[in-house]
Amino acid sequence: MIDWLIRGPEIATCNCAYGCPCQFNALPTQGNCKASVAMRIDKGHFGEVKLDGLHWAEIFAWPGPIHEGHGEAQPIIDQRASPEQRNALLTIMSGQESMPGATYFQVFSSMIEKFHEPLFKPITFTADVENATGHFKVDGVVDSKAEPIRNPVTGEPHHAKLSLRKGFEFLAAEFGSSTTKTQGKIALDWSGRHAHLTMINITGQGIVH
């Protein structure tokens, strides 16, 4: 297996209610799972290929819970990536160089039956993980925003953080509220749904503790 690592902030949004039941081994709020995810790689490599400073994003949709499969995915790679970097990121994102069950790339990919052709486009990304605030956008494809959950009476930010002893995406994440809209192969459109922001630090063997 090729040695790789990616480290940096990630924003994930999905169509579930705040908290996302999937994080607790429960069924998704809407009965299906739809999501958009993006990351900035502050430090990364795939073998000898450096990945520092690049972004990636992906749009997902499953007709039911993720574990029942039959999903589809739209990978999006930073337009600035070289051919070698593009191949490296697509290999990581498809779970090909991960131990079974060790990373969310491998788990999600094993539940997907259709990968759409990857897009190579500029990705705008900002994230303040601690304050559950962020935004990523790919023009003509996806626009996702995360902000703190608001107290319905006072309007004040309601900060919530989840800690997992055994996670394949993160060990700790700030939960928030998301607004997402897409164009293209996979249609997503919602506001006031789940978001989480976390610092990813992962290899093909799993999360780096």
Image (cartoon, grey):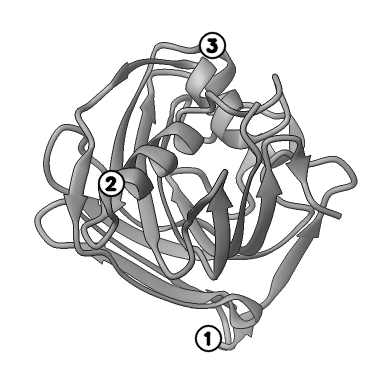
What residue is shown with label 1? 155
| Residue density around tag 1, few if under 14, some if 14–19, many if 20 or more, within 10 Å | few
Q: Which mark is residue 76?
A: 2
Quadrant (top left, top right, bottom left, bottom right) of the N terminus: top right
Q: Secondary structure at mark 3?
A: helix
Q: Amino acid at mark 1?
A: Gly
Q: Secondary structure at mark 2?
A: strand
Q: Considering only vertical position in the picture, is 122 above or below 24?
A: below
Percent position of residue 112, x then y: 42, 18
Which circle's residue, 1 or 2, is located before the other in the chain?
2
* Viewer-nearest of discs 1 and 2: 2
In this picture, residue 19 sits left or right of residue 51: right
Q: Which residue is depicted at the point 57% across and 75% down?
A: 132
Percent position of residue 68, x then y: 53, 11
What residue is shown with label 3? 68
Q: CA distance from mark 2 to mark 3?
A: 24 Å
